[in-house]
Amino acid sequence: MSRKASGNSGWHTETTAVHAGESVDPATRASSPNLVMSVTFAPEAVTGFSARDEQGYEGFIYSRVGSPTVAQLEAKLAALEGGEAALCFASGVAAAHALICGRLGRGDHLIVPDANYVGIAELTRDTLPRFGIEVSFVDMSRPEEVAAAIRPATRMLWLETPANPTMKLCDIAALAQLAHERGVRDVAVDSTYATPIATRPLQLAADFVVHSLTKYIGGHGDAMGGAVIGRKADIDALNLEATVHFGGVLSPFNAWLILRGAATLPIRMRAHEEAAFKVARFLEEHPAVSRVFYPGLPSHPQHALARRQMRNFSGMMTFQTRRPGPELAADMVRRLEIIHYAVSLGHHRSLVYWIGTDDIQASTYRHDATQLRRYRDYAGDGVFRLSVGIENPDDLIADLSRVL
């Protein structure tokens, strides 16, 4: 069950990250959050057997409906995003599926970016149409194309900014205003790359914000999770179907690990940004590198929007090289000493991975010819996605110099 954000709304972000959702345990006086692994609980009142009968009961009954440890994390996330409530799930994709399928049904229309995270791209392209949900893929950096795609049946606009792996941004406030004026009920923003330290979509008129907790908020690459944050009434309405019926709930142990990671999110994001700036400038000046996409650089096509919308430019970037990507990637596997050649992102250690355009187009972004041409014009034959960790940037630069 979701929990309203707790904590003083006047706290600074660093204090909120540490204390929101947490309190001293009244029985043991434990200062750190408890890890409650119990699946079932002895209720203080008689309730029915179905989760439908538990609506309005504020205690815990069964961990698929709600868990004390998960509830603490939900309260912390809601406070960090400035939302009223949150729901946690077993992964970022589970959170996205829960929101989309919990809010949409047969005959509804969804608009998503033409280039976004592979898991969401494949879910929306391959799975949703089987259940009668129509999907349009649009370049979210072109508001006129978004406006043209909206229909009377459009119920949700799905945004991702910065986008994975293109690093494209979209103007959340402008698109939310457009969607709501045209009668679109929900605007949802995947803000995994940005985190609440950089961007708070709910303050820009979005209705929901989604995170893969596996990434920056967890921050250590050892726990998978996802979350949806929004208005309490919407989250409560989502809870029964999205958690109890879909069943993709977060393990209390993973919630406990992510709670620990979230406490240091503000200081980690400062370290990520500081290191990323130095690495991005090094790459931009290196003769072996043809292009760098990092929102904090003036060379980014949407740098002005990034400065307006992001308070932290995060640690994510992509870059292109003059040497063929697969060849350089093979060298990275063999020769990198600090940076791991591995998927995922947002961990305390740096990660890099080659994302070839042919592979992306074949498996993920099979849209119309214009969109495919735009993607290739933007990304060339592919990009290296680099998630800059919190290591010393000089050591990261030395590691990259070894292979470049």
Image (cartoon, rainbow, N blue to C red):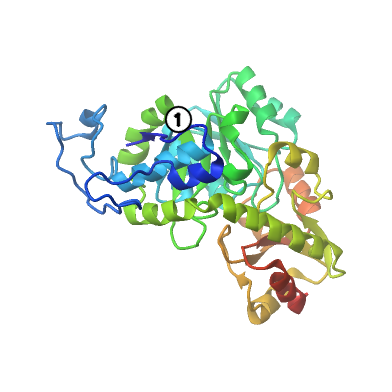
Q: Which residue is mark 1?
A: 84
Residue 243 location (% of width, % of height):
34, 40
The C terminus sits in image quarter:
bottom right
Residue 144 location (% of width, % of height):
75, 28
User: Left or right of 330: which side holds 202?
Assistant: left
Q: Is residue 52 visible?
A: yes
User: Left or right of 263: which side holds 251?
Assistant: left
User: Left or right of 368: which side holds 239?
Assistant: left
Q: Residue 319's image quarter?
A: bottom right
User: Left or right of 198: which side holds 400?
Assistant: right
Q: Is residue 105 visible?
A: no
Q: Residue 173's image quarter?
A: top right
Q: Is residue 392 above or below residue 115?
A: below
Task: Say what amino acid the circle numbered 1 marks.
Answer: Glu
From this viewpoint, which residue is outermost toward the front? 29
Mark 1 nearby-residue class (10 Å; few <14, some 14–19, many ≥20): many
Q: Residue 283's image quarter?
A: bottom right
Residue drawn at point x = 31 percent, y = 39 percent? 245
From this viewpoint, which residue is outermost toward the bottom? 334
Closer to the camera, 209 or 375?
Answer: 209
Closer to the camera, 363 or 314?
Answer: 314
Number of disc labels: 1
Residue drawn at point x = 63 percent, y = 71 percent? 339
Q: Is residue 103 above or below residue 17?
A: above
